[in-house]
């Protein structure tokens, strides 16, 4: 929280609030961004992406890096809080949501 506040203050020193766009880093990943195009801009998938045609959803998060310098954070917050409460639920919402 302290580092997030420091980053927020630093960005605010150089930009007006209306110029700042905050996004969770996970939602900025290319694969996550492409999910929206796959869902809503793809004429093949869009009419089939509903409960009548989908039996279940499985989300697999395959990390390519280890904890590296995040060990202290994970010891305090835990992987469940970091990955499931935030990122995996965000992905589930993108998969399950209605057309925006």
Image: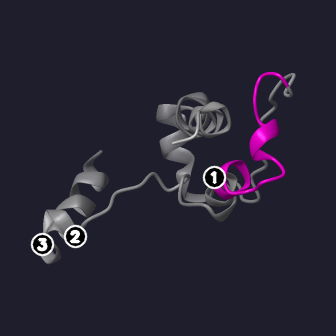
- Verify whether residue 42 appears in magenta: yes
Residue 36, numbered circle: 1
From what the image shows, is residue 11 above or below residue 59? Answer: below
Mark-to-mark CA distance, 3 and 1: 33 Å
The location of residue 81, given as percent across then percent down, is 53, 30
Image point (75%, 45%), residue name? 46
* Residue holding disc 2: 19
Q: CA distance from mark 2 to mark 1?
A: 24 Å
Q: State which mark lies toward you, 3 or 2.
A: 2
- The residue lying toward the viewer, choosing from 75 and 78, is 78
Give coordinates of residue 80: x percent, y percent. 60, 28
Q: Is residue 94 left or right of residue 38?
A: left
Local packing at callout 2 (Cα closer than 10 Å; few below 14, some 14-19, many 20+) is few
Q: Residue at x 75, y 29 (%)?
A: 50
Q: Position of residue 62 (x, y in %)?
A: 79, 49
- 24 with respect to 13 (left or right): right
Residue for point 66% across, 50% down: 40
Q: Which residues are magenta?
A: 36-52
Residue 35 vs residue 51, the one in the foreground: 51
The residue to which callout 3 is attached is 13
Looking at the rendered image, the disc whose residue lies closer to the viewer, 3 or 1, is 1
* Residue 61 makes an appearance in the image: no
């Amino acid at each position: 929280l302290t580092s997030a506040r420091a980053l927020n203050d630093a960005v605010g020193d150089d930009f007006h609030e209306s110029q700042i766009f905050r996004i969770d880093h996970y939602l900025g990943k290319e694969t996550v961004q492409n999910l929206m195009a796959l869902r809503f801009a793809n004429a093949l998938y869009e009419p089939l992406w509903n409960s009548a045609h989908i039996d279940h959803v499985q989300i697999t998060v395959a990390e390519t890096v280890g904890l590296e310098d995040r060990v202290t954070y994970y010891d305090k917050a835990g992987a469940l809080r970091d990955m499931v409460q935030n990122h995996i639920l965000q992905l589930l919402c993108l998969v399950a949501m209605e057309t925006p």
